[in-house]
Image (cartoon, grey):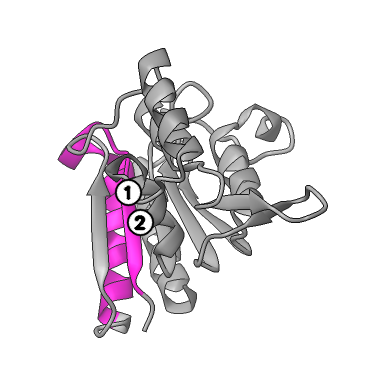
Amino acid sequence: MDDLLFINACVRGDRSRSLKLARHFLSKWQALHSQASLTELDLCTHRLPPQYPEVLEERDALWNAGKLDHPMFAPAHQFAGAGKLVIAAPFWDLSFPAILKIYLERISVTDITFGYDDLGRSVGKCRADKLLFITTRGGNFSSPETAWMEMGARQLEALCAMYGIDQFLCLAAEGLDDIRNDKDALMAQAMARAEATAEVF
């Protein structure tokens, strides 16, 4: 049975609508996969430093020395080895919070999450076949008029191709801050979609 790595980038903690939606999905998924393991990585608790010059210098020195087993690369190994991946983060400034961007930079390591073949083509090295992104948005960014402005899901989908993850899924509750909408009804609909997604994930 596949193990699942849940990457929690919900910076408002228990007040987060994205986390509430993610917890609902995970509860349903666990009920359907009672023998599977679930590991949560809370990026607000396990804080990775941004790739400042000194961090990059250490990283490059370790990589050039072939020391890919160094603890600095542990997040990349954890991500690459997971059977299934779920990321939860709110929609912020047309993308997602900085803690998730920092994490993505830290796990994007040549010869761990991706690499190159003899012809110089990028080759994904991650074990997971699916990545689910769970998010909530105040406005609607799925319509043809606004979809071009949404950068978070698009970046993750592109990274899936780079990492060799075949299927990218996005579960989004939208329009939650539009006063014309019934936000409780919108969240209820998203919860139902979460349950349906858990059955096929």
Please name the predominant secondary structure of the magenta segment in the image: helix
| Residue furthest front as drawn | 65
Picture coordinates of residue 138 (x, y %)?
44, 31
Q: Check disc 1 and report its element: helix, strand or loop.
A: helix
Residue at position x 33%, y 44% in the image: 18
The residue identified by callout 1 is 74
127 left or right of 194 in image: right
- Tag 1 near tag 2, CB within 8 Å: yes
Q: Is residue 23 magenta?
A: yes
Instruction: Locate residue 179: give its quadrant.
Output: top left
111 left or right of 72 in image: right
Residue 139 versus residue 6 in the image, above or below: above
Residue at position x 50%, y 52% in the image: 112
| Residue furthest top as drawn | 53
The residue identified by callout 2 is 78
Picture coordinates of residue 33 (x, y %)?
31, 82
Instruction: Locate residue 129: give its quadrant.
Output: bottom right
Q: Is residue 138 visible?
A: no
Range of magenta residues: 3-31
The residue lying toward the viewer, choosing from 26 and 184, is 26
The residue lying toward the viewer, choosing from 196 and 89, is 89
Residue type, label 2: Gln
Residue 65 versus residue 114 in the image, above or below: above
Q: Residues within 10 Å of mark 2 (few under 14, many from 20)?
A: some
Q: Check disc 2 and report its element: helix, strand or loop.
A: helix
Q: Is residue 149 magenta?
A: no
Picture coordinates of residue 52 (x, y %)?
39, 16
The residue lying toward the viewer, choosing from 98 and 149, is 98
Residue at position x 48%, y 48% in the image: 172
Picture coordinates of residue 62 (x, y %)?
41, 36
